Amino acid sequence: MAADRYDELMARHAALTREIQERMRRHHEEMLPLLSSASQGFGTHTDGIRLAGDGSLDATLELHDVHGRTSTVVLRADPLGEVAEHGAGARAENKVSREPGTRDETTERLGIITALANEHLPVAAAQDFLALVRPALRLEHAGDGDPVVAQLGGLPSLPINSWPVWDGHGPLSHVLTFECEPVTTMLPELGLPTTGRLAFFYFDGAFDDFASPVGTWDPTTRPGFRVMHVHPERAAAHDRMHLATPAPPGLTPFPAVAMTTVRTMSWPGSESPAAESIWAKAGLVGPRPGVAAPSVVALYDALHELPHGGYDTHQIGGHACPQQNAVEMEVEQLRRGLTGEPFEWSDPAVQAVASGWQLVVQVASDDAADMMWGDVGQLYFLARSPGEPEDALLTMQCG
């Protein structure tokens, strides 16, 4: 019976999440044609889904329009599974303010991205590009008073004898851990699990003097990374993992760095399958195959000049910021190598499938955590379904 109630609760949670995402999408489409140089930008915000005392799940969605006005919508999934809109006051008794210090720059960021897209791209291409913009959580080093949401490096808290090891090579290094509940509250669009914590591991090569590089071109290196979904809330009281797990013998852990979050907006890489379809549709291609038109190059040059717009960003969700090829294509190459399916970079069918990969986490090189991925590179964990993060695949880029 308990399992049935849990499954029913998760089904209602999924239905409410879909409704939130649909409302956000419709608002985005309605506001785009109204933007002008005099507009104040627009955006959406939700504090996430919460369980009410009567068993209902509800969420408050704030919609900011181009005139600076904000409307509030309360969505509720009742115990019978129906999702309906309620009055703004229906959730007042359950409303919890965001943690002090948590920042949200989505409205400002979207306004800047919109202005740059309209400046450099034709109208139709700009609208197609802006439709791909996604919210994300940027991870920054936590300062005094900042809410700590994640830990970069350091030691995770794991069940007994569960530290991941690549057989024949050695233990993986712990890269990042975060609690699911605050992350899904701040970024419900990603669709991560709402309970437990996620721990990310990678065989960076230091254990075996860099004799075993992990790469998407070699599917035999798949054991060189892992995502663990740890469920301390499901363990018995005496088995709950609250203490740091010692690193295996011979493995030096990265220094621990506390991380806070900023809700922001991200854009697709210029060579991602989704973006390249826009350039092809609009005729925004350069003199050689795979080379974008000068206007596209100018757009991305301007985007990368924005604060935190470059290749040195820790991030949860949104779009990856690649340093080389499209990361979606690289993890699709690995997936096909694992399954024995053919892979060809220029195959439209392969590109269409690759566009379905979603960034879960991007981890940059970081001096404070003593992390250096290649030549000041980044790690990218992507999943077909963020609700199943343990199935995520990894690629690393640098230079």
Image (cartoon, rainbow, N blue to C red):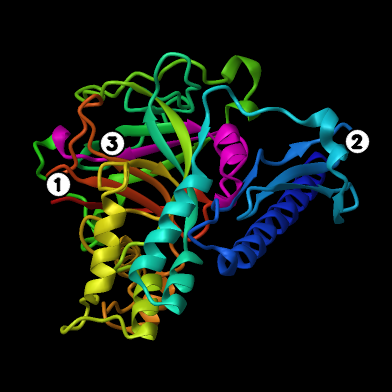
Instruction: Report the magenta residues as a range.
Output: 178-207
Q: How crowded is mark 2: few (under 14 residues within 10 Å), some or many (20 or more)?
A: few
Q: What element carries label 1?
A: loop
Measured in 3D between alpha carbons, the distance from the residue under mark 3 to the one under mark 2, in whole angstroms, is 45 Å
Compared to 162, does 194 lie above or below? below
Q: Can residue 391 be seen in this view?
A: no
Q: Does the magenta stretch include residue 199?
A: yes
Q: Residue at image x 47%, y 73%?
A: 128
User: Any mark on residue 212, and which?
Assistant: 1
Q: Residue at image x 21%, y 42%?
A: 168
Residue 103, given in percent of the width and then of the height, sits at 51, 32
Q: Report the amino acid beneath label 1.
A: Ser
Residue 369, given in percent of the width and then of the height, sits at 25, 26
Q: What element carries label 3?
A: loop
Q: Does residue 77 appear to the left or right of 119 in the view shown?
A: right
Which residue has dot 2 on it?
54
Compared to 24, does 372 lie above or below? above
Quadrant that contains the N terminus:
top right
Which one is nearer the viewer's eye here, 111 or 211? 111
Q: Report the amino acid beneath label 2.
A: Asp
Which one is nearer the viewer's eye here, 56 or 172? 56
Measured in 3D between alpha carbons, the distance from the residue under mark 2 to the one under mark 1, in whole angstroms, is 54 Å
Which residue has dot 3 on it?
172
Sequence-earlier tag: 1 or 3: 3
Q: Report the amino acid beneath label 3.
A: Leu
Quadrant of the rendered image containing residue 155: top left
Q: Can residue 316 be seen in this view?
A: yes
